[in-house]
Amino acid sequence: MSDRNSDIGGLPVEELVVKADEAMRDRRKTRAGDSSWVRTWDHFRREWQIYVMLLPTIIWFIVFLYKPMYGLQIAFKDYSIFRGVADSPWVGWEHFKTLFSNDQFLRAVRNTITISFYNLIFGFPAPIILALMFNEIIHATYKRTAQTIVYLPHFISSVIIAGIVITAFSPTAGIINTIIEWLGFDAVYFLTQPEWFRPIFVGTGIWQEAGFGSIVFLAAIAGVNPSLYESAVVDGANRWQMMWKITIPSILPTILIMLIIRIGNIMEVSFELVILLYQPSTYETADVVNTWVYRQGLQSGQYDLAAAAGLFNAVVAFVLVMTANTLSRRFSRTSLW
Amino acid sequence: MQKWSLYSRGDKFFAVVVSILIGMFTVATLYPFIYIAAVSFSSGFAAQAGKVVLTPIDATIEAYGYILTDPQFWISYRNTFIYTIGGTIMSLAFIIPGAYALSRPQLKGRRFFNLFIAFTMWFNAGLIPFFLNMRDLNLLDSMFGIILAFAVNAFNIILLRNFFEAIPQSFEEAARMDGANDFQVLWKVFIPLSKPAIATITLFCIVSRWNGFFWAMVLLQSEDKIPLQVFLRHTIANLSDDDEFAIVQTAAGFSAETVTAAIIVCSIIPVLIVYPFIQKYFEKGILLGGVKE
């Protein structure tokens, strides 16, 4: 690879006779007289380096993401470890029939949707409100410091988050019960009671992600045309009116897109945190599809049934995400991806 | 933004109320960390009785003495560093050349390859097939397996590819004139021009590796391979119903709560040290790869 001829100034370099060892970059023209395989050969001779660069990534995707998709066929098979994926006998929709007559699985589906729904109602507005409030703060250092602090929990692992929650909500040692008893009530065994799991889980999510989630909305607010505010000031509008009449309408497209993404991800409950916080006594409200899959498959070894549940989850999620992407195209010129 | 002196009385009141609310949220964010730090330095008895609110009660470092003398703590700490550094280097080794190739207009099948990668963001096979695949690959209980199997993700590649695509052609052309090949163009032109994007991806990799828990728990059996997060989880889960521990702790000044808190503090400290340095990148990063309006 010695030399490179580019189409300087947009002029095609038609006259150039391309020697095999020349790094000729312009691909838009076809040279009359060359058969297509000669051109293909030429292409790879010249451009082999980018294919070498791409190859490891493609192999990685095949080995770690596409091969498991091939393995998904065990959802329709009586999988045996000894026979392997390919040689296990087919059983058709058997596992799906089992799933949809399994109360625990159905409960997990319901819990997944319910928890996502709570996350949506309470968790979605939180970063927007936070961003709108940050926008009203005049003192730059105060704003900066507050932002630095509220972004922090996003970077803390779920094990630590769960550790903090378990410690804080502990019936005897935790600060929450200390306060409750100080107020004259009886201590509550928060983490063993089904009715408390969802508030704690959703609240923890807001505490951890609201700050970080506000970044997207703050960026949208920063993009609002300043002249809108200037003319509003001239008209005598106050900050509250400007927020409602200018800021919120201006960031509405961002809000809509983020909402669509959230709805598209409704099957994605952060099950890592669920695993860390739930226990058998709270499965009733806490068990989601992925935690059920984890217990059935990885802990009890019912790989085929668990894989079927996983496939169901993945297909529903896929349909939701695709719908969300199509919808978001309508609200923005570029799609999400 | 208007000048404060130009604010009406109502606006000033509004701004003050908002500042107070933000202050409350900030304190609420920070408080659990302060509480945990206070518990970690309290005596086991005070922590168990729920006496700790803001500052350590009967201040002691017994809990730290207990975990810092546990060889398993240091093994897992070392492992977390190995996973974080090794995993991040592995990720960049895949992602940077891959994103460069995908950003080249002359790449044949470019649309296909982009879709091939993006598809994995919308559909993935799930826990069980992934686990069985790891077993078939003989990567169970393997440190290298953890480093390799989580090296790449579609989001990071697409993020960097978008950044590469936005680099003006003229930069590249100058290098081509000097006879640079693709490897040289990537190394001498694209990487130096993409420092913010690469820093962002590096940050994402470091954070996800440092915090990685679920698959490490599932895939690793040997105690000498587990990362800090798994060790922390084991400790939290075991301490409270470990009889032997209960006997030890009655004699010593610590409890399950203070030991848990001490491990939490130890594993947060590196994050807190790095945090100020990475902060300027993640704000850009989240916007780089996120929603494009």
Image (cartoon, coloured by chain):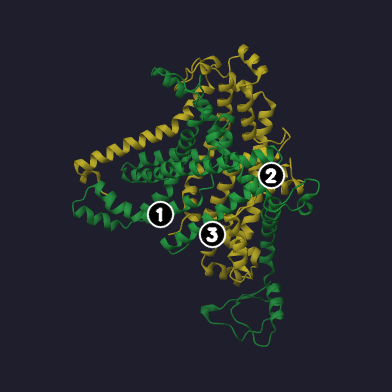
Chain colours: A green, B yellow
The nearer-to-camera label among 1 and 2 is 1
Say what secondary structure mark 2 lies in.
helix
Q: Which mark is residue A256?
A: 1
Indicate left or right for A18 with A154 as reference: right
**Which residue occupies the foreground of this view, A8 or A188?**
A188
Place of residue A230 in the rendered image (x, y in percent of width and height, measured from the top left): 24, 55
What is the three-letter code of the residue carrying label 2? Ile
**Quarter placement of the N terminus of chain A:** bottom right
The residue under the point 72% across, 49% down is B133
Let me know if residue B205 appears in the view: yes
Place of residue A310 in the rendered image (x, y in percent of width and height, measured from the top left): 62, 48
Check the residue under mark 1 and report the chain it is in.
A
The nearer-to-camera label among 2 and 3 is 2
**Which residue occupies the foreground of this view, B267 or A301?**
A301
Q: Is residue A193 above or below residue B225?
A: above
* Marks 2 and 3, how far apart at CA: 31 Å
Q: Which residue is mark 3?
A: B193
Mark sitting earlier along the chain (2/3): 2
What is the three-letter code of the residue carrying label 3? Leu
Q: Residue reaching furthest right? A: A82
What is the three-letter code of the residue carrying label 1? Leu
The nearer-to-camera label among 3 and 1 is 1
Q: Is residue B185 above or below residue A106?
A: below
* Marks 1 and 2, how far apart at CA: 37 Å
Q: Which residue is mark 2?
A: B146
Check the residue under mark 2 and report the chain it is in.
B
The residue under the point 66% across, 36% down is B227
Q: Is residue A217 above or below residue A51?
A: above
**Which residue occupies the foreground of this view, A210 or B40?**
A210
Q: Which mark is residue B152?
A: none
- Where, by quadrant of the figure, is residue A186 drawn? top left
Other-residue count near label 1 (Cα within 10 Å), few / some / many at <14 / 14–19 / ≥20 = some
